[in-house]
Image (tube, coloured by chain):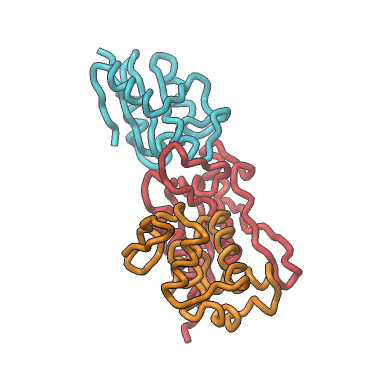
Chain colours: A red, B orange, C cyan
Amino acid sequence: MMATKKFMFVNRKAPYGTSYALESLEVVLISAAFDQEVSLAFLDDGVYQITKGQDTTGIAQKNFSKAYKALGDYDINKLYVEEESLSERGLNKDDLMDLVWEDEDEDWAEKPSIIMVNREQLSDVMAEQEVTLSF
Amino acid sequence: MALEVDGQTIELDEEGYLVDLSSWTPEIAKALADGEDVDLSDDHWDIINFLREYYEEYQIAPAVRVLTKAVGKRLGKDKGNSKYLYSLFPYGPGKQACKYAGLPKPTGCV
Amino acid sequence: MAMLHIVNKSPFEKTSFGSCLNHAKAGDSILMIEDASVGAIKNSSFSNQLTSALTDKKVYVLGGDLAARGIDKSRMIDGIEVVDYAGFVDLTVNNETTQSWL
């Protein structure tokens, strides 16, 4: 039996231009099979991974932004988003997808997965992690 | 690998999954099941249709744990358990059902 | 001698976009593709730099790359022109020289 550790996936790259975002997502989905405590951080250009209204028809790539909506099903419901990263990019919380998870213990009530944090708060959350994987 | 369905050649990868996911038809699902001596019942189709809807919405094939939970929610607690799903898909509900549904092999299928 | 400058890196991550703006001459054209398309948005920490470039240069963005990253055209800095792949080709044909800023 593996001990449970606190895993954090740190996402810092925009999707599609490079393959970091997709690779991170795939590892996140795989890690969910190992019953670890998984959280995600979106900062710097990583915030573009979860913007709403992504349409990839013009670049002939798969729109994998929809898969982030499934993270709740994988019991991954702590998505930390850095406020400063959004504002530096002319974005705000309303530009992000509405990512939720369903609480089975409360008759599948929908609860938000996105946790807005400032830079200082995010560094505190990062300091609590046991395994940090950066993409 | 390839499969003949209604006079058309359907390309499969080395593990028997559809190469072109958009080419899926119910007839292809039947042919894939025939190849593994499985007769598709309404219960099988409930799962296959569920998987196709899931993929359409999220663009991923769900892990078995996720599938089990979601089936329980959608089709009732008596069906949302691995015993029931394995009775339908003895080679593994994730792998086998996803194959018939024309989905890629589930991410994180170990 | 008008030059087309092609940038493909996010201005928030790499210095190549900023360097391009520092070196492009009046009358040149700048085309944002791939991750550089995110530089087109208003009210960012980079938008002032791009807005001042627009005073004497033309700035274009590849529409497909912008849409893929969830940025609506209505959010763009005024004066930036959206092009498709055909427009991309036209730009390379209509400029004497092309420089890519990687």
Residue drawn 44% across and 51% down? A12
Looking at the figure, which quarter contains the C terminus of chain B? bottom left
Residue drawn 38% across and 67% down? B16
Image coordinates of residue B41 in percent, x first then y, are: 59, 73
Which of the pair C90/C8 is nearer the observer? C90
Query: Does the rendering let one see residue A130?
Result: no
Number of disc labels: 0
Give the residue furthest to the right.
Answer: A107
- Residue C13 in which image quadrant: top left
Image coordinates of residue C23 in percent, x first then y, are: 30, 23
Image coordinates of residue A132 in percent, x first then y, are: 44, 65
Which of the pair C46/A15 is nearer the observer? A15
Query: Does the rendering let one see residue A81?
Result: yes
Give the residue furthest to the front.
Answer: B7
Image coordinates of residue A108 in percent, x first then y, are: 72, 66
- Residue A133 in which image quadrant: bottom left
Compared across the picture, whether A106 is left or right of B25 comes to: right
Residue drawn 36% across and 31% down? C18
- Residue C2 in which image quadrant: top left
Vertical placement of A43 versus B80: above or below? Answer: above
Vertical placement of B105 versus B59: above or below? Answer: below
Looking at the figure, which quarter contains the N terminus of chain B? bottom left
